[in-house]
Image (cartoon, rainbow, N blue to C red):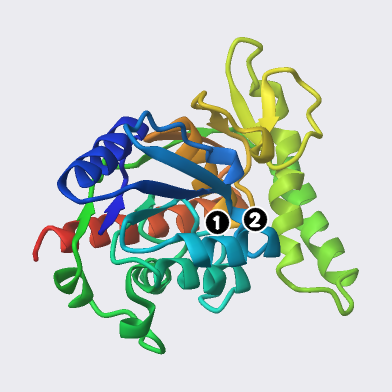
Amino acid sequence: MIRIGYTQTEKENEIQAYIDSHKIKKTYIFYFKKFKPTFNLNIESEYIEYSDIEMYKFFYRLLEEIDDSSLVVIDECMRTQNRNELIYNCAHHYLNQTEHKIVFEYFPFIKSKEDFMILLDFQNKGKYRGKGFEWEYLKQEDTEVKYKPILLTEIAIPVTEDNISKYEAQKEKLFDELGNKDPDTIPRNLHIWTGRFKKTVISSTGYYIARNSRFKLPNVVTYKEADMVPRVIIDFPHRRLDFNDYLKASRSRNIKFLSTGLPVDNFYKNDFTEWVERVREFAEASLCK
């Protein structure tokens, strides 16, 4: 079974209900270190961190131990869009040892619905090998999606004509210095650069999150430091997974973004709102089985 958007308590209840209705002797729980769970279950449970999945010290022992009296739980382990990632392939070996498996993920994908195939591979690698995403698969597997709308609110930061001129000059400078570098570095750097127009509105009593630690303020953290506190977005991270992790940690649903209205801020804002729409579409489709 695949369960999307579940809280820690909901996961625990789902696991325990499964244990109670099957002859399970031991549960193996694979998790990502930033979101290590602690489930209060009535049978023996072993926790294996994501990066250890491919380690020899676990691999051969687990292949011997896991059988049809075992329940394998994959908890928040979609960490790359590469379906052929070695860690995924090692996890498939464990999952193939038992018919009892539960896959938990807070969002159905990292960037697009094609990523959902990673979760389907966990459920049944042989069945979906080499196949692209089809909506029909949601009807074929035991899949449930819990969805709460995500709303984005812009906090407008006034910019002057002089600010706009400086922005255009910085953009031209980045293009001139690009050389053989990845063109994507231009919007990445510009988005950070616009932070100079936002610093004056950062309140000492608020909570904020930024791509790096350049503001050197105690109430501004980076995405690597993200905790359970909902924060105002100064700039979005480049990697979608980093922002997904922030949403997963904070459970934030009302996103506030300091926006200059300059093209690069609009680019990142639109990229996020398009992702939100894809998540909504997926959740609604899951209800139409």
| Residue 52 - label | 2
Residue 23 lies, with reference to residue 149, above or below; the image says below
* Rendering coords of residue 264 (x, y %): 62, 55
* Label ID, residue 240: 1
Q: The residue under label 2 is which amino acid type?
A: Asp
Task: Give percent across and percent down for residue 89.
Answer: 54, 74
Q: What kind of element bears circle 2? A: helix
From the viewer's perspective, is the residue at label 2 or at label 1 nearer? 2
**Labels 2 and 1: the sequence-earlier one:** 2
Residue sitting farthest toward the top: 205
Q: Image quarter for residue 214?
A: top right
Query: Image check: 118 left or right of 135?
Result: right
46 in relation to 220, above or below:
below
Q: Taking 138 as reference, is 195 above or below it?
A: above
In the picture, measured across the screen, residue 15 lies left or right of residue 262, that is left
For the residues labelled 2 and 1, the Cα–Cα distance comes to 24 Å
Q: Nearer the viewer, residue 233 or 102?
A: 102
Looking at the rendered structure, the secondary structure element under dot 1 is: helix
Disc 2 packing (10 Å; few <14; some 14–19; many ≥20): some
Q: Amino acid at mark 1?
A: Arg
The residue lying at 70 percent from left, 68 percent from top is 184
Residue at position x 40%, y 32% from top? 39
